[in-house]
Amino acid sequence: MNTSSQPYFEYPFGAESCEHEYAVLQDRYREFFYDLSRFNQEALEQDTYLIVGRRGSGKTSLTRYFEFQDKIPRAHCILVDVSDIYNTLNRYLGNQAYLNPDLVVGDVRKIWDLLFWLLIFGEYCEQDESLADQIYKLIGIHQPCKEAGEVFQYIARNYLDEKGGITDELMQLQNNPEFQTARITVLRIILNEPVIVAVDTFERYDRENEIMMSITAALIQSASDFNIRYARQGIHIKAFISSEIFPYIKEGNIPNTTKFIRNPVYMNWRPKDLVRLITWRFKKSLAFEGHAAGMMRVDWENFKEVRTRMWNPFFGEEVINLRGKPEQSLPYILRHTQMRPRQLVVLCNAIAREARNAGKYPNFREISIAQVIANAETDLADEVLNSYNRIYPGVADITQEALAHAPAIFKGNYIDEVAKRSKRFWPTNSYTAAGFRKLVAELGIVGRVRKKDERTGIIEADFEYFLKDRLVISDSDECVIHPMFYTKLQIVRDLPYIIYPFPDHPDYEELQSSHL
């Protein structure tokens, strides 16, 4: 039981963002962190340097986990917020006339390399006087700042010229014998005390901004090189990249994808992980309140036990959907998300809020869960649209103009028929029917039917956000609108089908089983 005088949060499933949770909890954040996710292990594998996830998938939470993880013993952790770095580099490099975009990537990669080394030197210089002396001879500072933003500003002041290029001094610095000696010294320390450098993702990317895209491509290349050269010696660079922009980086900005993009970890959550996360947090809240369910033992590796002890007694085994038909509660709630932790937290907190207002908490099954979700899912749809607004300017107007009052199920050629309605909302001369088709697939608004069961009325569909490549939709493909967008787009649901936007994976077969 939590013995703190204050609960974690107002509602039992946590806050909508890691930043909010960390601001509230500070040193107690590790108490609230769900440490059973498979991503915790995958991200710390020695050959992992690239972690890709959409907004709300838990990227920032994972960077915070690195601060108290125990898989890599005695590890130091350096967190890099990229906001100032991107903005400053964009300002400097925007003045430089590069003949080839690959040259931008090459130059910025050198900046990332230097930033990582200076941060690492700063982290360990107090542990070795000779390292501190070597750093002073290099940059005239006895103890470099450990904050990435300040270290980067030092680099910008000293190694970026007014025309936006990198100076000769930058290359001379890294070739300096003192630099090489400092590197040898710090690597000797790191053999016993490894370091994790976690580079968090930029919030929103503009795919038309070649400089921003090149900065990200350079980060991936630098992280790749560090992984090859130094991971076995104890330096672990972990670059987090937004899934919203990653396909564009991979297709257009990385000069050699097989060389620089190796085995990325995709933060695609499965139902077992999501349900464990949400019920684990719920159990902590119940324990604080003295509820009996908060005290019981739960085998978190046993999904059946988690579902029967921590889900069904509160949410009910079934909910009545807005058509008055019963559905299993767990897949019902999950199918109104794109399987991201933040989305499930938002929906479950909305359910908890309504139950409290009705005096039914924690018996969520006694309220209309379906109505609560219908009221809350618009916020989830809006966040997806917002996350793509720099990639597709005007995306909210584009999708609403074309797909408002669309049927929930249709043939692929319907997408082209309605696409033309949105033409006036696209930037000048950028509209194409193919571009609209790409947009609705990329955002996870439209999926392709994989299986239709006439007996159960369940349609299983593939959506791009669960794939490692583009979702290709042909004219003859049967397509569906994602349930999370039903309210936002006022989708017409005449046919008595239930859409399951889940990938073809054994976890989802177990999720749909009614015999758990």
Image (cartoon, rainbow, N blue to C red):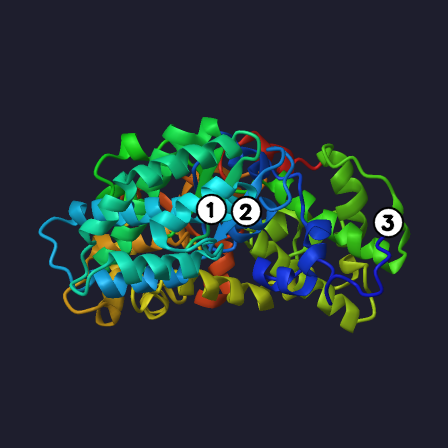
Q: Residue 330: horizontal and vertical position, in percent?
A: 66, 47
Q: Residue 276: horizontal and vertical position, in percent?
A: 69, 43
Q: Residue 309: horizontal and vertical position, in percent?
A: 81, 43
Q: Is the residue marked by circle 2 packed among few (<14), some (14-19), or many (20+) residues within 10 Å?
A: few
| Residue that carries the numbered disc 2 in the rendered image | 126
Q: Earlier in the sequence, mark 2 or mark 1?
A: 2
The kind of residue tagged 2 is Glu
| Residue that carries the numbered disc 3 in the rendered image | 293
- Which of the 4 quarters of the picture holds residue 407? bottom left
Whether residues under marks 2 and 1 lie with C-beta atoms below 8 angstroms apart, the answer is yes
- 351 sits to left or right of 175: right
Q: Nearer the viewer, residue 69 or 439?
A: 69
Query: Under tag 1, what secondary structure?
Result: helix
Q: Is residue 287 above or below residue 461?
A: below
- Report the disc number at residue 177: none
Whether residues under marks 3 and 1 lie with C-beta atoms below 8 angstroms apart, the answer is no
- Measured in 3D between alpha carbons, the distance from the residue under mark 2 to the one under mark 1, in whole angstroms, is 7 Å
Q: Earlier in the sequence, mark 3 or mark 1?
A: 1
Q: Residue at x 26, y 50 (%)?
A: 108
Q: Is residue 234 above or below residue 126?
A: above
Residue 88 visible in rendering: yes
